[in-house]
Image (tube, grey):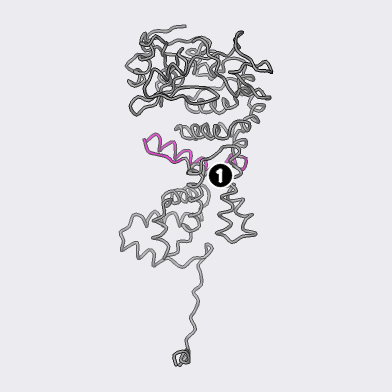
Amino acid sequence: MKHSGVLKRHQIDSAALDVTDALQEAGYQGLLVGGCVRDLLVGQNPKDFDVATDATPEQVRDLFRRARLIGRRFRIVHVRVGREVFEVSTFRRSAPADDAPVDESGEQVDRVHDAAGILLRDNVFGTLEEDAFRRDFTVNALYFDPSTEEVIDFVDGLQDLEDRTLRLIGEPKVRLTEDPVRLLRAIRFQAKLHFELERTIAREIPDVAGLLVEMPAARLFDEVSKMFLSGYGQAAWHLLCEYELNYTLFPCTPADDELIDLAMRNTDTRLADGKGVTPGFLFAVLLWRDYQALMQQALTQHKPFEAAAIAADLTFRNQQPITSIPKRISQFAKDTWALQDRMVTRAPRMIARLMSQQRFRSAYDFLVLRASAGEPELQEAADWWTNYQEQNPEIQEKMRSALAPVQNGTPKKRRRRRRKSAGAGSSSSE
């Protein structure tokens, strides 16, 4: 159960140690748990450090000056140390307690399921061992005590790490039904760790997939964002398609879209290089085909500018019930889409205005991506913009002058002016 020497205290973030030390000095247990322990054991750098304790959320809040309670489904505490925020959770149990209060239906007040068996609230506190058995995957149920430098393992998580296997704790059907989002977590961990999904989990995916749409749309957005912005987005997308969960999350997005594959790969590369990424760009890619289809429908009744706005709004309106995309992200995608035609037509007098647009860089990147992903007719425009941005103002002026007036993707014929006859307009001046 306890394994010494596997991890060392100096491997832990110093601010995280401040939290665990403060809990232990106050007489509580303070242990690191979950992904941070797992990642350290497989040689990866944790993105964050979560803490587990036997102190109640209220006791944790009272212990730290900069702390606040959050959540209804799971009440936890966010503790701020410097600029870092640490999630501190109280040990919970899965099995009902004999003396726990119940409501009129006989269910525990602090544990609530819906009719489908989905867990809506779980604030039944327990012991360290009980907490381990109610967690999702064995590799996420490992604890590290910084004071003794011991890894605590109740569920053979260390063995599963060695075997590179993702295994649920408990009966897979029950665990997936009570929280279908565990399917997405399984895919994210599989993509990140390159582990094999236990066969019993894979068998349940078709039956549980439909329950994903019962989850809060905001929670699905958060989980999808984590999946695609983890640095392993391309592998995660391939796994989603392999298990046919892509159609649950993005019903109108084809599985074999080269545009998505390239976007995921580029995002992974940027994250590996320490560069920033924008969720709005990925959602612009993921929903592009849906937008194009709706655009064609709208063009039958509206002018192009109106059709584009209608199609963009409808695209995100259709997606909102599944993954509730914040307005700042949906607007980023809409702006990126709106500039595509103008990037292709390149009206000479509009070039400077286009480059001053807030989403110009995003629109340019999107155009280049489309050209690389099976739309070769866009390559000339993409190359022109690439070259234009690298030139000095004098050459840029020549490039603008060389552009033929274009309308709807084809050169526009110049209208010949009629010569005025002698004396034309003379009557108006007399």
- Residue visible at 49% across and 43% down? 329
Kindly indicate the quadrant of the structure image that contains residue 99.
Answer: top right
Where in the figure is residue 42, as x and y percent of width and height? 42, 19
Q: State the residue in front, 6 or 146.
A: 146
Q: Can you say whether 337 is above or below 203 in the image?
A: below
Horizontal side of 422 relative to 319 (left or right) equals left
Residue at label 1?
A: 287
Q: Where is residue 243 in the image (x, y as percent from the top left)?
A: 61, 30
x and y percentages locating residue 21 in the rendered image: 35, 14
116, above or below 379, in the image:
above
Looking at this view, is 228 or 85 the one in front? Answer: 85
Helix, strand or loop for disc 1: loop
Q: Give the range drawn in magenta.
A: 251-278
Q: In this view, does 230 lie above or below 130?
A: below
Q: Which amino acid does label 1 sit on?
A: Leu
Question: Residue 272 at x, y = what percent?
Answer: 39, 34
Whether 92 is among the magenta residues is: no
Can residue 382 be seen here? The reply is yes
Residue under the point 62% across and 21% down? 112
Along the viewing direction, whichever of 316 and 142 lies nearer the viewer: 316
Asked if residue 203 shows in the view, the reply is no
Magenta segment includes 264: yes
**Residue placed most toward the observer, 40 or 386:** 40
Neighbor class of circle 1 (other Cα within 10 Å; few <14, some 14-19, many 20+) is many
Q: Name the quadrant of the C terminus.
A: bottom left
Residue at image coords 34%, 14%: 9
User: Image point 40% across, 60% down: which residue?
Assistant: 353
Label count reads 1
